[in-house]
Image: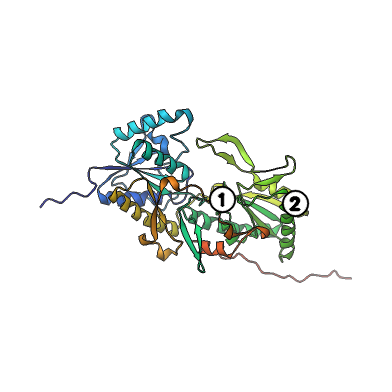
Amino acid sequence: MAQPKRICEGKTLAILTGGGDTAALNASIEAIKSRASILGYKVYGILKGWKGLLDDGDIVELTNQPYDGVYGGTALRSSRTNPFSGDKAKERVAQIMRNLKRYRIDVLVTIGGDDTNGAAKKLYEQEGVPVIGFPKTIDNDLNTRTIHNYNGQLINAVLCPGFPSAAKGIAEFTSRLATTAESHSRIIVLEIMGRDAGWLCGAAMMGGAEISLIPEFPVTKENKQALFEKVREIYSKTKKHFLIVAVSEGLRWYDEKTGKVDVVYASSEVDDFGHPRFGGVSGVVASEIEKATGIQARAQNIGYYARSGDCRNYDKRFVSVLADRAMDLLLREDYGKMPVLSKICSYQELEEFNTSTVDMGNIGNQPLPEVYYDQSEFHFNERYMDFLSYMVDKPKAIRFDYNFPKVKPFE
């Protein structure tokens, strides 16, 4: 007896990853590939984001190929290529359409943030390309409409794959940093990724940082002195006299020389989406803290560590349930949509019934809600810590408790 064909047999689905990498990208690719294969799709991987659909194309076969979804980053590589960039747009879109036809790609799944999925949505609306988006960002600033229930208070939060793994790594890194800060009785200003949103910076609080400075709440001329006083207060109250201050790379900081509140740029160059490269604000903040307080301060940039390493357990299961929802979109041919988590939930509750979909054209960027941050204290509050606790365990504190008796000189 002949076996019936699978519902999508004879069709081809292609996956691409765009923008910055995260530890959850390979896990996302694996989850989407496995489910698409069950439906009967031939599965391709597009290399280097949108760049892989330009010129002659750069496509690899994923069907029936083993894939490691725990290994961090993306085996498909990535780039910040924008199909709709300036005067190149018409030519790039024409190349993409030609390659979709040449490689006989029926459906495109784009894993990325607002830039990558925004470009995909344009292709869907303007050219009729069947696309499904898949969320990705360690900055955690896509408007996923994910509700956080904090003691009956419903907060419009965000949760994107990649953020839980990065947040856990930052909490652990911060906890380890305490030993060197203590050894030198120093203040360490830890710079963390976050262009426009402070979600990730808050993870350092889980690891022992006492102060956090984020893009949503600029350090102005008026509140800079209050910050320095808070630094003195916390440092002096700490038994071992050390302090970790976490800052987002996109922090808006008042510059005495220019009289302006602005970010610190590592480079004046911008990418295809118009984004400059931030970096160096921790050095500025550390220098001014030391000058204002007289306490030795040093800068530490966590850099790409936040993106790196294996996919953590929460993220692995998270992308699996989002891929379940993506399979539903494929079956119903409901294109131009993106699966999201509908409510913040524990690892055990990560199931398809706790997911929903949003229109890819309306994801946008969402900053940290004000209810998560106490501006006068320069500190994330208990609401944010409750949000984070669903996906990140507090690192085991590294302590060396001592109270050595003083030795008096012999007379």
Q: Nearer the viewer, residue 25 or 105?
A: 105
| For the residues bearing labels 2 and 1, Cβ distance under 8 angstroms | no
Q: Which label belongs to residue 290? A: 2
Q: Is residue 313 left or right of residue 259?
A: left
Q: Is residue 18 visible?
A: no
Q: Is residue 372 left or right of residue 50?
A: right
Q: Colour scheme used in the picture?
A: rainbow
**Residue at (75, 53) in percent of width and height:** 225
Q: Is residue 236 left or right of residue 125?
A: right
Q: Position of residue 181 (x, y in %)?
A: 67, 57
Disc 1 marks a residue whose amino acid type is Ala
Q: Residue at x 37, y 36 (%)?
A: 126
Q: Nearer the viewer, residue 409 or 197?
A: 197
Q: Which residue is mark 1?
A: 197
How far is mark 2 from mark 1, CA to CA? 26 Å
Closest to the observer, 403 or 185: 185
Q: Position of residue 403 (x, y in %)?
A: 72, 70
Mark 1 falls on what kind of element?
Answer: loop
Q: Is residue 383 above or below residue 53?
A: below
Q: Residue furthest right?
A: 411
Can residue 228 be seen in the rendering of this structure?
yes
Q: Residue 175's mark? A: none
Residue 68: image x %, image y %?
Answer: 38, 50
- Nearer to me, 51 or 308: 51
Which residue sits at x=33%, y=38%? 128
For the residues carrying marks 2 and 1, which lies nearer the camera in this image?
Answer: 1
Task: Say few, some or many: other residues with alpha carbon within 10 Å of mark 1 (under 14 / 14 to 19 / 20 or more).
Answer: many
- The amino acid type, in three-letter code, at marker 2 is Glu
